[in-house]
Amino acid sequence: MSGKYDLVIVGGGISGASLLYTTAKFTDIDSIALIEKESEIAAINSHHTNNSQTLHFGDIETNYTLDKAEEVKEGAELLAGYLENHDADREMHAKRSKMVLGVGDEEVAQLERRYDDDGFGDLFPKLRPIDREEIAEIEPAVVDGRDPDTELLALQTPDGYVVDYGETATSFVDDAAAETGVDVYTGTTVTDVTPTLDGYTIETDDGRFDCSAAVVAAGSHSLQMAKELGYGQDKVLLPVAGSFFLADDLLNGKVYTLQMKKLPFAAVHGDADVHDASITRFGPTAKLVPALERGRLSTVTDFLDVFGLNAAAALSYANILSDRVLLPYVLRNLVYDLPEVGPRQFLPHVQKVVPGVELDDIERAKGYGGVRPQIVDTSAKSLDMGEAKIVGDDIIFNITPSPGASTCLKNAMRDTRTLLDFLDADYEFDEAAFRADTIDNFPRDPDGSVDTDPAGIPAADD
């Protein structure tokens, strides 16, 4: 196969799929292609077993500043609006209670300051503090068996969107593929990207594509491709493999714990699986791995390509891993993978959420978990928290660890504006129609956002 396109998008996960949907449905770009190396859309990190299934708003993520929460909030509302508009049957998502739990005087005080003094109560009108009694009504297992003298407080919201990002990505692609001038190629691996006078030539194992502009949304591989073209030389990756432990039917929604300072990784939380509420997942664990995809030895060499085996990268790793908070965390997470010892060491984290859990109640999930590329700035020798975007000559590279899936449509909106500048034609982005299909459908009424039973527990809808 071969073809000439105005725009080629490399990568069919949630990031590439959301950009395809945005450009195909709401611009008049004449021709667009999506190239995905797997035989199915969203088969790697966007698959529902390989991520936390959380739509991050910034309301219960206690490592977010108010400014970051405000930015993430709009992105989450765009995606939530899409789901409300396109998924009435709850095939792509479920909506449940969500809370961050403070245990003990110090954590309770921290949550009170966050809600009252730091402005999170004002930014999120549906977020509210609830005490032990109301926590027990919504999540009985969180209170059962806990010392009655231990102070408890939670910040709770009904906007607990649990998302199958794989199905959502597929929905984006299906919507886009119905448009004229849009082609989707799966099972097609990019082997080379070469700049030309008119844009780029993208060689694949199944033919050549020429394009005026390109976007690489291939997760960890985005930086690998960027470096091959001379971009992102001051960045390397710290790949982190996430995993989960499973238990039977303990929680109705999501229960987060407070984030440990300095860590870019999510705090341990418990939640009910998006497609089977009788399965409760606890995690994630976070293990450093020298590969760009979990369980694929072939991507070890890809990691070495990104790492570069140079002094700047090595010194950056040494500086980051010598941190007194991060190093013990990394070592503990290595232990969690050990048979017998691992579950025993992880159990206290589960018991902070559900105190009545015993060792026999949890088991390591097999086949769950993906790799998240934490970005390292080799100039500053530090971790860059959040996503990275490298903008080159008529090309964009997106590297999107959490909350990249939550903000996929906001990123797509930004990239669409950049692409129209690249194409230097009379193309237009109908942002009003884009918002009408997405964020305008997000329910903003604090009292009418979710159906509840008399105990305040969200009604089952999945």
Image: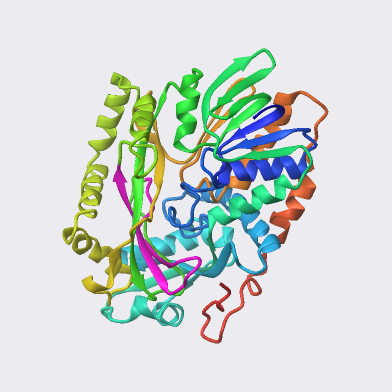
Residue 442: tell me if it is visible.
no
Task: Look at the image and tell me in which quarter the N terminus lies.
Answer: top right
From this view, report whether residue 399 is shown above or below residue 114. above
Q: Residue at point 55% right, 51% down?
A: 406
Residue 293 inside the magenta-drawn segment: no
| Residue 395 found in image quarter | top right
Residue at position x 36%, y 34% in the image: 298
Count of number-bearing discs: 0
Residue 390 seen in the current view: yes
Is residue 428 shown left or right of residue 33? Answer: right
Q: Nearer the viewer, residue 42 or 115?
A: 42
In screen coordinates, is 146 left or right of 2?
left
Q: How is the image coloured?
A: rainbow
Residue farthest toward the top in the current orientation of the protein? 197
| Image height of 453 relative to 377, above or below | below
Q: Position of residue 297 (x, y in %)?
A: 33, 37
Extreme residue in the right direction: 426
Give, as a single range, the part of the protein colored magenta: 264-288
Looking at this view, name the residue that lies furthest to the bottom: 454
Tell me if residue 390 comes above or below residue 115 in the rendering: above
User: Can you name the residue that lies furthest to the left here?
Assistant: 341
Q: What x and y, as percent, mark residue 390?
A: 54, 28
- Left of 105 or right of it: where is 45? right
Q: Is residue 269 magenta?
A: yes
What residue appears at the point 61 percent right and 44 percent down from the top-left corner?
Answer: 17
Percent position (x, y) of residue 63? Answer: 41, 51
x and y percentages locating residue 64 in the rendered image: 46, 50
Q: Which quarter of the image is occupied by the C terminus?
A: bottom right
